[in-house]
Image: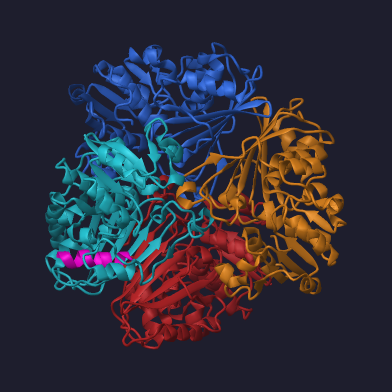
Chain colours: A red, B blue, C cyan, D orange
Amino acid sequence: MIRVAIIGASGYTGAESIKILLQHSKAELAYLTALPEECGAVEDVFPQFKGRCNLQIEPLDLDKLAGLADVALCCLPHKVSMTFVPKLLDAGLKVIDFSADYRFKDVDIYEKYYVKHTDTENLKHAAFGLPELFRSQIKRAKLVANPGCYPTGASLAIAPLLKEGLIETDGIIVNAVTGSSGAGKNPSEKFHFPNMNENLFAYGIGTHRHMPEIEQIASDVAGKKVTVLFQPHVGPFDRGILSTIYCHPKKNLSNEQLSELYNGFYKDEPFVQIRKDAPAVKDVAGTNYCHIFVTNVKGKIVCFSAIDNLVKGASGQAIQNMNIIFGLEEVIGLR
Amino acid sequence: MIRVAIIGASGYTGAESIKILLQHSKAELAYLTALPEECGAVEDVFPQFKGRCNLQIEPLDLDKLAGLADVALCCLPHKVSMTFVPKLLDAGLKVIDFSADYRFKDVDIYEKYYVKHTDTENLKHAAFGLPELFRSQIKRAKLVANPGCYPTGASLAIAPLLKEGLIETDGIIVNAVTGSSGAGKNPSEKFHFPNMNENLFAYGIGTHRHMPEIEQIASDVAGKKVTVLFQPHVGPFDRGILSTIYCHPKKNLSNEQLSELYNGFYKDEPFVQIRKDAPAVKDVAGTNYCHIFVTNVKGKIVCFSAIDNLVKGASGQAIQNMNIIFGLEEVIGLR
Amino acid sequence: MIRVAIIGASGYTGAESIKILLQHSKAELAYLTALPEECGAVEDVFPQFKGRCNLQIEPLDLDKLAGLADVALCCLPHKVSMTFVPKLLDAGLKVIDFSADYRFKDVDIYEKYYVKHTDTENLKHAAFGLPELFRSQIKRAKLVANPGCYPTGASLAIAPLLKEGLIETDGIIVNAVTGSSGAGKNPSEKFHFPNMNENLFAYGIGTHRHMPEIEQIASDVAGKKVTVLFQPHVGPFDRGILSTIYCHPKKNLSNEQLSELYNGFYKDEPFVQIRKDAPAVKDVAGTNYCHIFVTNVKGKIVCFSAIDNLVKGASGQAIQNMNIIFGLEEVIGLR
Amino acid sequence: MIRVAIIGASGYTGAESIKILLQHSKAELAYLTALPEECGAVEDVFPQFKGRCNLQIEPLDLDKLAGLADVALCCLPHKVSMTFVPKLLDAGLKVIDFSADYRFKDVDIYEKYYVKHTDTENLKHAAFGLPELFRSQIKRAKLVANPGCYPTGASLAIAPLLKEGLIETDGIIVNAVTGSSGAGKNPSEKFHFPNMNENLFAYGIGTHRHMPEIEQIASDVAGKKVTVLFQPHVGPFDRGILSTIYCHPKKNLSNEQLSELYNGFYKDEPFVQIRKDAPAVKDVAGTNYCHIFVTNVKGKIVCFSAIDNLVKGASGQAIQNMNIIFGLEEVIGLR
């Protein structure tokens, strides 16, 4: 059994990771940590685990951690994460990091959108944890940067077109709507129920940090610089991201050709499903699946993808990465 | 035109009062105040009023107030309210107070459930602002204590039975579910969208402050002490309270007799409608109406009532009271 | 008082029209009709009007109609509408038609997206009822084609750019999300609560009938042919449409220039508000307002607009048109 | 591996059963049937299973069934169920029936609330499938009547009090609110999203078929006739039932005594958790757990229980029963 620690277990991605690991046949929860003020019995922090998990969430003790766990899911926010990850690696653990701290190969982009980077050494060796596109890197990594939720859904939707050089690499528009769990656990005015309920709005206009992340992935896949206009929105539901993506084809592709391309590209991928119609976020809620539909509309190619932002967009993908690192069957715990 | 000030205009009951007064043909918004940090143009505090209201929300200036307004809707929380109400009265204004501070005739009950009372003098002269039951007092009042949302819905539902002495006066059970706007505008963990959405739970078990308020109204109507077990819940919707009330009849009453009783009792009341089937909260959302249905079930009388907690349960009722005080037609602005 | 008939009063746009007209100081509900199986007292068809409206919804009697009403709001579906409108006009009434039957100047486009047109005579004289863009035509019209909900929100958002020739006229992308009331009152699998709740999905991919309607309006405004890729989605809320529109500027425009352009273009329009930040659908829910924000993002101009699909997108706009036709102040009943 | 057939697999309880069985380590989906017009690939009927389940839903073929399956989950509606169950039993299968057809020991009560019973022979031998109260019967049963959703939540909440004779056996009030998935998959006016959303209402007043079912269970546990006033409501969420139950204690019991009683009664039950505070429906959504809290309020005992109506209230409990019948660990597939 792989022994798993969750660092920063008191938030939504922590809870989702606990939920998945409770059903994992080859891994077990070994150690859960959080800030002192957020500690306590798992069942007190998350009533949904009463009777299902008897662990405590404790303040992090690195010595204890080293003896208890083989791998750490690091669910800390950016900036905080890179102060802990080096210590986790030094303690001999494999690390799957949920923050943005190890996602950007170009540290300048990271520093433009986030903060000054304080662990560029480990950054060099981090794998980008989107298995469908970068599996071989992940296999041999000690540190995996788990992708952002939006970049996961958007990148999977356009990768086949970019890989084959079939669309223009500038002018891609990614219009996405996320459920509210993406906002995290801390109450705020925007996500106060009487505001968020029955509501829908755009945010992060021109400035969202997932824009350069999508561009990095897309550029990697295309083998050349790709620019993306990414516009996120948030809607009144818990889980899911629906991305609607508008691309300019370089030459005409029939819907049959598109379907063949996508089915071929993802034919061995258990978690990517090519649909014959538009996916709904509820089709993937609570699962690690990404549903994709692609079609021609008025001279453009429009791609639709749906994922659960907390699963394929966070905890599920992290455990998929963990399975890869440890040589397990990739789908364990995620079906 | 009656000139209306709203004291504490930056919250949900403030917004609802503004909305109603913008449509009122005999009253006008004259002065809006809030805590300094919540001030600004109405359209900045509440984007829904952009182009509809050009006023500023300003810190309270009592001298200015005295010159500008005839009546104050005081939307402050309990305890704060009773520090301002005496000043508003001294400034010559009529006051309709939304807090609990002037609702309890027995100061001991108030102090048991809230805090020490610091304005017992004005408390003596306050009218209880539930027009359907206490209209004559309201007509001649300078200070009206606007009722709580739960007490409004529950009391209207059982008043005819209590007035006629047809039910036992102990053992009444009021089971109610409110929408989330009842929680007010401040973000909190319970009302964070990812928690409140798809959820329903009980709260205030045995301790909710509206329990003694319902008992006071019920006792007034019955002419004897009434005890009530009140259990509130909150559900994933914005507006509305559905009360389901279980009473023991002293003697058998047919459904026809119940229907006659209720239709007779409320026959001149514009805002109380006796239904022939169970009311839904959506039937009254955004209105000042209370829909009631009453029927026999297995030896008990079960009463159902639906109101909008922000309208009949707060701002609408306040303006109904204002109309009464100023001798206007009671329904103006509220149809 | 203008006497208003509603033809097809039993659906959502009928209810919304009734609601608005109950508050209209210069118009009154005179006659309500529906299919025989949907008739009955208004309060039985719509419990929310109990005590507020004592009218009956009756099967249509043209003779009776002619004597009772000055104007008909015709809330029938397309194809049905054009069988009734000629009779309503013959009876001497002004008509505001909610269907698509009189919206398309090019009957071929209508027939491609809908059915064979059977009243091309009246089609010639119909005004397109988007007051902010076509007010002068509406003023002198006997028959007004009330626009679709999506076209209203989308067209208002891009009209200033098109009018001034500042954007490319092909390649405009309109990505929109509507609330579920747009689906109408008839139950269906997609809008069954357990399916629609917590869900979001695209529909009408490449085929939605509002696409040519947006193109017609845009072309009229631009004075040349405009092509639009319109992609609608539906989300789990009752009311509202948020349109996010991506345009290619012909030359650089600063955000200040955009703001000036829009504020100037709509400076006399009571129902269009130019925001300094992204509008939310809840800001306009229940109102006749359209909130617009426009900004530069990565070389494109992105426009956001929010309307209530049942008000500015249907019944509110119809009554705005009615006010114009009868020479009333345009905002009556709609503030 | 236990081979499981699902009869009537095209509805919500069918889908939930499929979902659970896909994760069950000792059972496998063997045969799925539905009405001819609802058949097809599982992934076409339920897009959420695309890539997860390659089975077809087929019209029932009894011969085929007999060769393929050891147990049938019969998800048919009442009346239909009792025409199939005898055949399933004759084919040598164990049967867990989701309908009401085999729940009532007193056939007169069944026939009063439902229809004429046509299989009283098998009725005699059916076990009532609420494991926490009737496990020993279930162990040796060939036919298990899976309980209704409301009766599951309500009965577990009051069983300890009834078993120990601590409350009055008449006058128990069960006030419950269910999520909308309880309505099943067929669209209807009440559950049309624009009606159900933002709504809450009572239904089945005095007539709900789960009332006699709760009374039967309660009477069994108490060893004497128990009468219950059961009032269901439906709210705007997908999953969950919150029951709030008001009982009259025969003598005073402290909260400590109540807590001890409940913790003792359920100490070996994996799926019943005694809370120290009020449970929320979201705490149990998607799980087979029942969370209970019990406390004194004003001389009454108030019990709160939360379950997921589709899991502990239907498919999860059915699989719990299946595990019992086949001598498996009871929690397999349900953690």
Looking at the image, residue B248 sits to the left or right of residue B331; the answer is: right
Q: Nearer the viewer, residue B283 or D259?
A: B283
Looking at the image, residue D317 sits to the left or right of residue B3; the answer is: right
Residue B182, image x, y percentages: 44, 37
Q: How many numbered circles does the render carry?
A: 0
Rendered image quadrant of residue B18: top left
Q: Residue at x 16, y 61 (%)?
A: C160
Classify the position of the C terminus of chain A by image quarter.
bottom right
Task: Give the main secondary structure of the magenta stretch.
Answer: helix
Residue D334, image x, y percentages: 70, 60
The answer to whether one can see residue C238 in this image is yes
Looking at the image, residue A274 sits to the left or right of residue B17; the answer is: right
Q: What stretch is highlighted in magenta?
A: C209-221
Residue A187, image x, y percentages: 44, 49
Whether residue D330 appears in magenta in the rendering, the answer is: no
Looking at the image, residue D16 sits to the left or right of residue A284; the answer is: right
- Reply above or below: A5 against A128: above
Q: Residue at x 74, y 67 (%)?
A: D5
The answer to whether one can see residue C317 in this image is no
- Reply above or below: C146 against B106: below
Residue B331, image x, y percentages: 33, 26
- Reply above or below: C79 against D199: below
Whether residue C212 appears in magenta in the rendering, the answer is: yes
Q: Nearer the viewer, residue B248 or A129?
A: B248
Q: Which residue lies furthest to the front in this view?
A: C63
Classify the position of the N terminus of chain A by image quarter.
bottom right
Rendered image quadrant of residue B315: top left
